[in-house]
Amino acid sequence: MPPHVTPLTDPGTTPSSRRLVWLASDADGVPLGSAFLRLFTKDGQEHLAELEIAVHPGERRQGVGGLLLDAAVAAARSEGRRSLVAQAEDGSPGDLFLAARGFRRVLALTYARLTLPDVDLARITQIAQHPHPGYELTHWDGAVPPGQARSFADSRRAMDDMPMEGTDYGSVVWDVERVLSAAEAIARRGESLHTVAAVDRSDGSIVGFSELVVPGDGRGDGQHYGTGVLPEHRGHGLGLRMKAESIRQARLRHPELAGLLTDTADSNAPMLHINDALGYLPTHKAAEYQLTL
């Protein structure tokens, strides 16, 4: 008998998206694979859906992934979506599967890791504390302080020109509500959000930021969520300085943290240079795939 695909209820709804889920199982109800379809709901991204498919290694090449994909594609179309994106590690079964099912590669990514116990803390501190006339760094844990919320939300446009190559990603519109809800979502998962921001001394506005998410127990690896500087304030080394400060704080505040993870588009030469300068080492390559619906 062919696998049976069952739609499930998923609680993963946020102010910016909601998810649909399917479980593939055999005649005895044994799970074989799953699919998650994230439907973006905010202005600028209502055309987009994001797919994650996982199939048990022993059940691959049996049509399970194809059935899950068919269910997700049909749902995305019924929701009026224009593009479906998915990511896979280079050379992985998912990489081959997506290419064979009509997806096209639209973005190349490099994943890298910094081993925290090996960090030269004196060197990182020197970078973080290097004076930049007209700017200073600040930081906070969790949600942005109320007095800085509006300025921080405005600074998010620093990511608007992030290289996305051929990805039909749309535009992410950040407001105070979205900034706060993102921090709340991280807290609900039991993780800690640490933000370092660059401030323009002339008016006190936030002009750049670097976000790091750390596991709740302070162990394992932390994940960089984004580093960006407003276009009109670039060229002063603020990106390097903020990320160095994020590393410095992680090393001092989370002594059991093993490493920091980051991923960067291969076309984003400035951020790749920052990662190299701070000692991040590439771990693997991945690709963003896209299917036009």
Image (cartoon, rainbow, N blue to C red):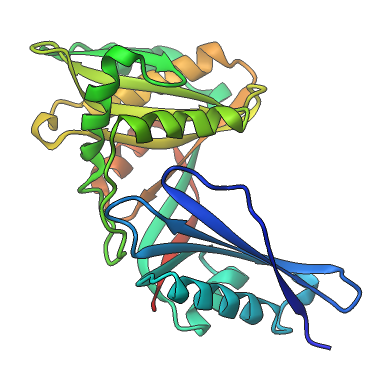
Residue at image x 60%, y 15%? 255
Q: Is residue 268 above or below residue 256?
A: below
Image coords of residue 120 (percent x, y): 46, 19
Give coordinates of residue 66: x percent, y percent.
62, 81
The N terminus appears in which quarter of the rendering?
A: bottom right
Residue 139 image point, x, y percent: 36, 14
Point out the residue furthest to the right here.
28
Q: Nearer the viewer, residue 58 or 9?
A: 9
Taking the spot 25% from the left edge, 48% from the top edge, the residue there is: 162
Q: Is residue 212 left or right of residue 227?
A: right
> Above or below — where is 118 with respect to 140?
below
Which is more toward the observer, 162 or 175? 175
Numbered label tally: 0
- Residue 195: horizontal and vertical position, in percent? 39, 22
**192 lies above or below 31:** above
Residue 231 figure quarter? top left
Q: Is residue 74 above or below residue 135?
A: below
Residue at (31%, 29%) from the top-left corner? 176
Q: Which quadrant holds the C terminus?
A: bottom left
Along the line of sight, the residue nearer the viewer: 249 or 194: 194
Q: Is residue 129 left or right of residue 96?
A: left
Residue nearest the observer in this picture, 114 or 68? 68
Residue at the image position 14 percent from the left and 26 percent from the top: 236
Q: Quadrant of residue 146?
A: top left
- Viewer can see residue 165: yes
Q: Left or right: 118 with respect to 167?
A: right
